[in-house]
Amino acid sequence: MQEATEANATGSIPARIDAASGRVSINPRDPAFFQDPYPVYEAIRAEMPAFFWEEFRNWNFLDLEDVNAITRDRRFGREILHVASREELGWQPVPEPLKPFYEMDALSIFQREPPNHTRLRTVMARAFVPRQIEKMRGRIHAMANALIDGFEAKREVDLVPAYTTPVPAFVIAELLGVPQSSVPEMLDWSHRMAGMYQLGRTPEMVAAAIAATHEFTAFLIDYIAYRRSNPSDDLISTMIAASDTGETLSEPELVSNCIFILNAGHETTVHATGNGIKRILESGMDAEILLGSPEMIEATIDECIRLHPPVHITDRYVLEDLDYRGVALKKGHRVGLVIGAANRDPARFANGQSFDPSRPRQPHASFGGGIHFCLGGALARLEMEVTMPMIFRRLPGLHLVDTPRYSDTYRFHGLDSLNVAW
């Protein structure tokens, strides 16, 4: 059941590789790269397992063994200011207008290390236990069916705005306990805030992100106040209750982590679902077989997530001077973990560039590792288990009407559009 390996049509790659120095130049905003980064990864891997990315000014690791090891190595972490001051690191002060974004972002569970990470994860994990996740299955099924009902008669649609985006957004809103009517506004805030993670962001993008931070924060402060008086069976109420019973979850932490859950939980699942549908449509394989049983659904979705992870790169700070893989790393440096390359590591995955749902299941890096292993991974899988088989079952003859294109958001690897007909 193996699809042919993807290949670079021109045989050239949009990168300059200097194996002697370990330095590589790749413009992450070059469409020739972000539309198909995999040939670049393999060309680098053929020369070295780690490289210094000139544009990002940091060392990056490609192999799954290294990515897994670094996510579990306590000499690396998501934050650094708990062990060093800005002055010690030689960092400039954060400009005053940017402080609202960075102060909010720094309080999310994703950016914290123990003991704060442990405290936050203990509270938030209560919403992601298997029995709570499984409760969402019927609701996801109803949402997906209703969306397809809305466009089925059109015979052609862009699935990104019509299908892959709304389901995760409404699911996260329901999980948090915020009104479904607020979803479009929250998505707008989320998309504007994502501009802060872009390389080469413009002043306009920064201004839009800061404005969105203020607006999203104000909305959540008001809604948290409402939920204090009107608790329900949702994550915001759970976090409020934890705070009120002495587990010291501050209101800024409440706000930050609500924003993080929406941004991370929504964006990644949108991309994973779109990438998965695209992969199946391009494979030429029979979707009825790939998605015909619970076992095949699980295997196919896992293979889609491995082959096209929605997050292509993540990073860690170096918490002490050390030597890793022959690379001298100083305290305060960042290292990149290239998930998109690690998931195709030939040392772990035979014919790793190919789409093969029948391959023996092995862990990959798409959901992270160590203490930062994705809390919402099971929820994302559940959404895909429901929405991907349904779209093929409801729309027989589903096929692409043009070549899907990826967005210019390198860290996230997701589609601008997915135009299909049936």
Image: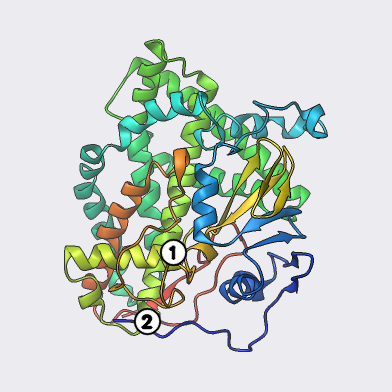
Q: Amino acid at mark 1?
A: Val
Residue depicted at 54% across the width and 31% down the height: 113
277, 60: nearer the viewer: 60
Q: Is residue 216 above or below residue 254?
A: below
- Outermost bottom residue: 10
Q: Quadrant of the N terminus?
A: bottom left
First reached walking from the N terminus: tag 1 or tag 2: 1
Residue depicted at 71% across the width and 53% down the height: 327
185, 377: nearer the viewer: 377
Residue depicted at 48% across the width and 59% down the height: 310
Q: Quadrant of residue 156?
A: bottom left
Q: Quadrant of the C terminus?
A: bottom left
68, 313: nearer the viewer: 68
Q: Is residue 204 above or below residue 45?
A: above
Q: Is residue 136 above or below residue 272?
A: above
Considering the numbered disc 2 on the image, is that residue within a helix, a strand or a loop? Answer: helix
Q: How many marks?
A: 2
Question: x, y (%) of residue 9?
Answer: 58, 88
Direction from residue 296 to residue 196 in the image, left or right = right
Question: x, y (%) of residue 112?
Answer: 55, 31
Q: Which residue is mark 1?
A: 160
Direction from residue 373 to residue 296 in the image, left or right = left
Which of pointers 1 and 2 indicates the residue nearer the eye?
2
Q: Which residue is mark 2?
A: 283
Q: Is residue 162 above or below residue 9?
A: above
Question: x, y (%) of residue 132?
Answer: 24, 37
Residue depicted at 35% across the width and 53% down the height: 167
322, 288: nearer the viewer: 322
Considering the numbered disc 1 on the image, is that residue within a helix, a strand or a loop? Answer: helix
